[in-house]
Image (cartoon, coloured by chain):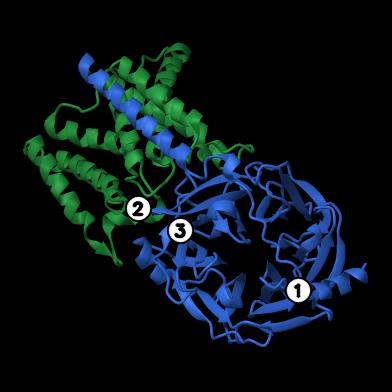
């Protein structure tokens, strides 16, 4: 190599790295000072009477298994849910379904329709896709809806990759799937389960997790589309090791948050961690008094800074679903209601949101056959919190 | 070049290199230039054959999001050398490529896959230390007039242009196959050397004769 060529290449290297650094600095995802949780805990409606409404989103169907529901509020007070269903979990015939509910408690869930399956994902991604799963749906102000879901090309769930679809018309039509590259090792073992947390500036902190050699919780940071290439993203780790997955993040202030993890170890307790920098770094996980039978859970923030959690109240089984409240950010808990309890049955993967009127909506897998939707107001929570169950 | 088109490059190059190797054994009388050009043409046509709705060369993308630039250029160097008889990357450049793949993969994979609570892969989305380290390695190699420095400049250019299906800088510099190949390229001669020297010392058996 001639000296002049080397000098030219060095100049090129300086320019290219400087350009890369400038792009990084310009990204809203780069600076921790720009990341602040959007405070969006809707105040309670003036409610005198405790009220709870229960319904099923999908009709039962012989030989059809459903799981992993998520929920979001659309414009005009409508609700939308997404879950996956097929002959069995991980089957090649599994589709991600989408259903919409008209506003109000007397509104009805429309018939579910498939949004994506292995064949359509394979077409859209120009890749072989064996199965799809774990959809998480969330909305932005307006009619923008996001759908994150996993696809597997090789192996089981540990071979999952994350994909994103968006809709600009509340889920009537969807963009083509886009695969996100989140793992350096063949881009596998990145999964999603729980509710994303909005930040100021339209950024979303999506709790995701890795499940391959290690099993650990992470945050996927998604920024709005700034170019034709689409949304920009990055991720950060919440904890290492082989124990904790499916984080549920609850913002407690502009920069403070608490997260609860599904525990895959023999400890069989719900584990929590805290953050004081908008979720960029997290404290080491520590156990809570709540049991966890290696199953999904979810928590949300209520007015007056109390945390409500939906979880399986057992160290072994998913045959009950319980609600508990914490007034100290997750350190201690008071069980307030048993939503389901049938020995041998399965009630799992709870997912909660608060709507614009201050109602809490809970969806979960019911016997693996149906997705159940339960809505309750704050008076109902107060009535049960007052006479909390032991 | 779009991320979609760039996903074809590495599989087609590997296919061409494999065909070239096969051609050297089956068609010894043909000139190396002819074998090289025909191998590349055959690889292109084989890679475009649709299998289950996807071109054959697109199938590796189902299992791996992107193949890194340095290893793609190492494979290209192999094809070029076999076709034209003069390598794009000389001995020191290739050695630097293997060391880079081994050290980069050694830093990245254990921690990115869960060892410890710090994830170096996160730095690939935006980190001053990773940017500085890559820049420093590139400049040091170029100061030594090592050809692998040029490869790293091309990797930086590819990252700025986002020609792969990834937003992460690590994916432009390292991939698991590159690291495994680096381990083999660095490890096999080392194991052979240690084995031969042990044989000589312990049993008095002479080492394998050199053929060069």
Label disc, if present, on residue A154 of the rendered structure? 3
Chain of the residue that carries numbered disc 2 in the rendered image? B
Instruction: Give the mark toward the camera: 3 or 1.
Output: 1
Quadrant in the picture for residue B62 = bottom left
Asked which quadrant contains residue A231, the reply is bottom left
Q: Which mark is residue A221?
A: none
User: Considering the image in quadrants, where does the C terminus of chain A appear?
Assistant: bottom right
Query: Along the line of sight, which residue is nearer the eye, A372 or A291?
Result: A372
In the rendering, at what x and y percent does residue A333 appear? 86, 59
Of the pair B184 and A378, the residue shown nearer to us: A378
> What secondary structure is found at the residue carrying circle 3?
loop
Look at 37% across and 34% down and name the residue there.
Answer: A19
Q: CA distance from mark 3 to mark 1?
A: 48 Å
| Earlier residue among tags 3 and 1 | 1
Chain A color in figure:
blue
Q: Please indicate whether residue A268 sits to the left or right of residue A109 in the image.
A: right
Q: Residues within 10 Å of mark 3 (few under 14, many from 20)?
A: some
Q: Which residue is mark 2?
A: B60
Which chain does the numbered disc 1 sit on?
A: A
Q: In green, which chain?
A: B
Q: Using a 10 Å C-alpha cutoff, classify the residue at mark 1 as few (fewer than 14 neighbours), some (14 to 19) or many (20 or more).
A: few
**Rendered view: B107 above or below A32:** above
Q: CA distance from mark 1 to mark 2?
A: 54 Å
Q: Are marks 1 and 2 in contact (CB under 8 Å)?
A: no
User: What's the chain of the residue with tag 3?
Assistant: A
A115 relative position to A59: left or right: left
One can see residue B208 in this view: no
Image: B104 above or below B91:
below
Disc number for residue A45: 1
Residue A357 visible (yes or no) = yes
Residue drawn at x 13%, y 40% is: B36
Residue at the (36%, 24%) spot, across then down: B138
């Amino acid at each position: 190599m001639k000296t002049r060529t080397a000098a030219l290449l060095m100049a090129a290297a300086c320019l290219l790295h400087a350009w890369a650094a400038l792009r990084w600095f310009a990204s809203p995802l780069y600076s921790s000072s720009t990341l602040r949780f959007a405070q969006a805990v809707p105040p309670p409606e003036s409610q005198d009477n405790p009220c709870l409404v229960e319904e099923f989103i999908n009709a039962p169907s012989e030989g059809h298994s459903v799981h992993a529901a998520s929920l979001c509020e659309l414009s005009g007070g409508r609700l939308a849910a997404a879950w996956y269903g097929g002959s069995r979990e991980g089957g090649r015939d599994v589709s991600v379904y989408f259903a919409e509910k008209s506003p109000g408690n007397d509104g009805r869930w429309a018939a579910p329709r498939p949004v994506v399956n292995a064949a359509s994902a394979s077409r859209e991604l120009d890749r072989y896709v064996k199965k799809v799963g774990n959809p998480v749906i969330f909305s932005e102000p307006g009619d923008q809806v996001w759908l994150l879901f996993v696809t597997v090309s090789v192996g089981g769930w540990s071979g999952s990759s994350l994909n994103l679809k968006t809709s600009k018309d509340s889920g009537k039509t969807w963009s083509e799937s886009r695969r996100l590259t989140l793992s350096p090792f063949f881009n596998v073992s990145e999964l999603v389960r729980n509710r994303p947390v909005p930040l100021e500036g339209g950024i979303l902190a999506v709790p995701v997790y890795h499940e391959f050699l290690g099993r650990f919780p992470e945050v996927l940071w998604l920024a709005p589309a700034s170019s034709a290439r689409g949304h920009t993203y990055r991720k950060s780790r919440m904890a290492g090791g082989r124990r904790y997955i499916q984080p549920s993040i609850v913002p407690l202030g502009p920069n403070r948050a608490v997260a609860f993890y599904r525990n895959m170890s023999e400890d069989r307790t719900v584990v929590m961690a805290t953050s004081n920098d908008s979720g960029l770094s997290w404290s080491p996980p520590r156990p809570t008094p709540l049991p966890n039978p290696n199953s999904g859970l979810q928590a949300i923030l209520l007015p007056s800074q109390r945390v409500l959690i939906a979880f399986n109240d057992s160290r072994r089984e998913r045959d009950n679903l319980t609600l508990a409240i914490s007034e100290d950010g997750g350190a201690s808990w008071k069980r307030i209601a048993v939503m389901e309890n049938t020995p041998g049955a399965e009630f799992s993967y709870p997912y909660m949101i608060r709507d614009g009127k201050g109602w809490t909506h809970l969806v979960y897998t019911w016997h693996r056959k149906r997705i159940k939707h339960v809505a309750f107001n704050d008076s109902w929570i107060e009535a049960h919190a007052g006479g909390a169950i032991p | 070049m779009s991320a979609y088109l760039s996903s074809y490059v590495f599989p087609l190059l590997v296919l061409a290199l494999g065909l070239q190797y096969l051609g050297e054994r089956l068609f010894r009388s043909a000139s190396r230039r002819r074998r090289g050009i025909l191998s590349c043409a055959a690889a292109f046509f084989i890679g475009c054959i649709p299998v289950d709705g996807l071109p054959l060369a697109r199938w590796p993308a189902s299992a791996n999001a992107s193949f890194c630039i340095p290893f793609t250029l190492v494979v290209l160097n192999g094809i070029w050398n076999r076709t034209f008889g003069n390598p794009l990357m000389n001995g020191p450049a290739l050695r630097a490529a293997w060391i880079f793949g081994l050290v980069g993969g050694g830093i990245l994979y254990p921690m990115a896959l869960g060892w410890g609570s710090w994830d170096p892969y996160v730095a690939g989305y935006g980190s001053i230390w990773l940017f500085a380290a890559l820049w420093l390695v590139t400049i040091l190699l170029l100061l030594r007039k090592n050809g692998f420095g040029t490869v790293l400049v091309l990797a930086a250019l590819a990252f700025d242009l986002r020609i792969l299906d990834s937003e992460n800088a690590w994916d432009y510099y390292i991939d698991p196959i590159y690291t495994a190949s680096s381990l083999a390229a660095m490890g096999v001669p080392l194991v052979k050397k240690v084995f031969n020297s042990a044989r000589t010392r312990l049993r008095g058996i002479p080492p394998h004769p050199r053929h060069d």
